[in-house]
């Protein structure tokens, strides 16, 4: 489309040389291909020169139009006056591809040094600047040129510019710039898609060339597709078709964002603040509506093609399903999802907390249920487990009554959890049964939450329980809270995390992040305290930690503390602490040392990670 537009602008100047329109467009396509195949750096350098010409062309037009500015003419042109065969949406279809360049930066994300910072800033800046220029041009055209001239065959923007030739050069450069941007961006999308290994037939396009991994194989295919477009027809034929697939692209991006937000997946941690699921939903519905209004036929074709691609991806067993839950289909959808989840291969990106809290009846230790729900942050599952010691044959009716009482308590306290009660003759056997058998498919507990025991007579039994859970490859959370029975009051102070450079750190950071998402904890600052040995290079460690947190998209204060005694260093750096996360090993940690950690100010959360959570996902 951009090459055809470039040729339409250039052709009147060189029509006398005897070459046909398609021949000139083909030569242009070859030149664009040659610029891009040499590397993105070369093509981007060309864009700087193009940008300079565009700015001069815009200034030339605005100055020329300002000299002929007429308020009366502007008022007259404010009224609509569509010519035969045209309406708002037919013109929209022609104009829309002119504003699709905002995706160029996203397409080049693999070549950006800091995509998470550059893309939001760049895209929003581009939208603002482009909107200002387009609206300004429309107003100045309406205020300086009569309606008859505007709908006539002349190049009115050039004719009213201070330097007409500069506007001509600007149009040529604008279309050439867009052609270069498309030829750079589209192959990178294809390369990334091929590297996902969804369709093996596309693997050839996933190969990179040179030190920068240029997608030259994909560039060749893009050139061929563009050349087919050159032979198809003029701009009025190509633009509406391309508009459909641009709208489909934007609609899909909005739909993906909507589903990520509604899924509450802990791995979806956008760095921008302006986010709400309603915004992408409106965007997705708006794109679909405009597609149908522009051309129901081409909208149908675009939707059928995208549906076919989705079907093929689904058959490749990499599709991500989503959907709302309606009362009539809730059971069947849950069944199908559980069956699918049973066959999914686990990936750290999809880690979610599935916690079983051994509370002895939540009404006895409500703080355990509260912390378990805060840690799931509406993204995981909490089960409240109660163990009744005795023979099942003797206590079966009591077990049913206890489960009903626990379920009623959960409903009364508005706790997002499921009750589970087991009867066994000893605590170890009960723990084995709960951890092994509770849950279904991929919803089985991956974390056991307990309260801290201060009963010296039960130390051996308690330690044995922790070691048993570790051998069963489950993570452990031990909560020591100053409040034991009443509804847990969130204490004042920071969410502190004792970074000890162990495998527990990733899980502690994720739990702290999820805790901070709870409305009660949202205003509490997150602080990571890392004790280091005396003489350690604090600056280097701080840079490494900053980089790790930036890549994990988690914001936190950092306190790197050189000290001989790590525990005392943490005590001094905690300040006013609402809760402290600290790692431990059920088999290696000394119980007395853990007691000294638990005695630190505020609530204390001891964490052991089974290794299934990752900050890099």
Image: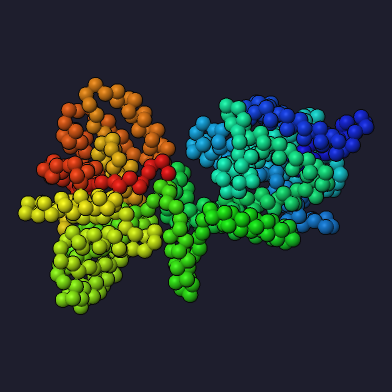
Q: Is residue 220 above or below residue 510?
A: above
The quarter of the picture where the N terminus appears is top right
The location of residue 282, given as percent across then percent down, is: 56, 57
The quarter of the picture where the C terminus appears is top left
- Figure disc tally: 0
Question: What coloring was used for the rendering?
Answer: rainbow
Q: In the image, what residue occupies the spot 39% across and 61% down?
A: 441
Q: Is residue 604 above or below residue 362?
A: above
Q: In the image, what residue occupies the spot 71% across and 29% down?
A: 35
The location of residue 544, given as percent across then percent down, is: 36, 30
Q: Relative to 384, is 296 on the left or the right?
A: right
Quarter of the view holding residue 342: bottom left
Quarter of the view holding residue 222: top right
Is residue 472 among the parts visible in the rendering?
Answer: yes
Give the farthest residue toward the top: 535
The location of residue 457, given as percent across then percent down, is: 6, 54
Q: In the image, what residue occupies the spot 38% across and 37% down?
A: 549
């Amino acid at each position: 489309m951009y090459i055809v537009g470039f040729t339409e602008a250039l052709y009147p100047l060189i029509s006398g040389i005897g070459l046909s329109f398609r021949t000139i467009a083909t030569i242009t396509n070859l030149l664009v291909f040659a610029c891009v195949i040499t590397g993105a750096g070369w093509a981007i350098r060309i864009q700087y020169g193009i940008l300079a010409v565009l700015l001069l062309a815009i200034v030339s037009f605005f100055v020329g139009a300002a000299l002929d500015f007429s308020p009366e003419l502007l008022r007259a042109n404010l009224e609509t006056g569509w010519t035969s065969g045209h309406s708002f949406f037919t013109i929209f279809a022609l104009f829309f591809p002119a504003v699709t360049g905002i995706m160029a930066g996203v397409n080049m994300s693999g070549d950006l040094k800091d995509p998470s910072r550059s893309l939001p800033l760049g895209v929003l800046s581009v939208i603002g600047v482009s909107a200002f220029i387009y609206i300004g041009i429309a107003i100045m055209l309406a205020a300086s040129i009569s309606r008859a001239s505007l709908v006539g065959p002349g190049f009115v923007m050039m004719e009213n510019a201070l330097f007409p030739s500069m506007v001509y050069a600007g149009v040529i450069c604008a279309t050439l710039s867009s052609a270069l941007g498309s030829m750079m961006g589209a192959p990178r999308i294809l390369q990334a898609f091929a590297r996902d290994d969804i369709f093996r037939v596309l693997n050839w396009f996933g190969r990179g060339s040179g030190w920068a991994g240029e997608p030259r194989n994909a560039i060749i295919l893009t050139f061929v597709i563009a050349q087919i477009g050159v032979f198809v027809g003029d701009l009025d034929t190509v633009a509406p078709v391309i508009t459909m697939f641009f709208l489909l692209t934007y609609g899909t991006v909005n739909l993906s964002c909507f589903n990520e937000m509604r899924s509450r997946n802990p791995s979806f941690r956008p760095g921008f603040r302006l986010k709400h699921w309603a915004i992408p939903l409106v965007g997705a519905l708006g794109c679909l509506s405009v597609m149908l209004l522009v051309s129901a036929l081409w909208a149908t074709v675009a939707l059928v093609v995208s549906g076919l691609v989705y079907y093929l991806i689904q058959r490749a067993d990499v599709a991500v399903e989503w959907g709302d839950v309606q009362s009539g289909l809730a059971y069947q959808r849950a069944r199908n999802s559980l069956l699918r989840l049973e066959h999914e291969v686990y990936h750290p990106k999809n880690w979610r907390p599935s916690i079983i809290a051994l509370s002895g009846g939540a009404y006895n230790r409500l703080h355990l249920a509260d912390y378990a729900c805060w840690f799931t942050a509406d993204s995981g599952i909490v089960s409240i487990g109660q163990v009744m010691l005795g023979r099942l044959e003797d206590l079966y009716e009591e077990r049913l009554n206890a489960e009903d009482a626990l379920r009623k308590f959960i409903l009364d306290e508005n706790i997002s959890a499921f009750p589970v009660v087991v009867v066994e003759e000893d605590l170890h056997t009960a723990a084995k049964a709960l951890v092994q058998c509770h849950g279904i498919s991929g919803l089985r507990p991956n974390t056991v939450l307990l309260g801290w025991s201060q009963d010296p007579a039960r130390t051996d039994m308690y330690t044995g329980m922790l070691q048993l859970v570790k051998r069963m490859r489950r993570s452990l959370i031990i909560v020591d809270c100053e409040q034991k029975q009443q509804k847990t009051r969130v204490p004042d102070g920071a969410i502190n995390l004792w970074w000890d450079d162990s495998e527990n750190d990733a899980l502690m950071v994720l739990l702290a992040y999820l805790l901070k998402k709870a409305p009660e904890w949202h205003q509490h600052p997150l602080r990571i305290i890392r004790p280091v040995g005396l003489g350690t290079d604090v600056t280097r460690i701080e840079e490494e930690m900053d980089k790790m947190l930036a890549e994990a998209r988690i914001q936190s204060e950092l306190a790197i503390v050189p000290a001989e005694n790590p525990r005392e260093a943490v005590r001094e750096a905690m300040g006013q602490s609402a809760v402290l996360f600290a790692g431990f090993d059920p088999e290696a940690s000394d119980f007395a040392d853990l007691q000294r950690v638990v005695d630190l100010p505020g609530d204390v959360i001891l964490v052991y990670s089974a290794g299934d959570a990752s900050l890099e996902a």
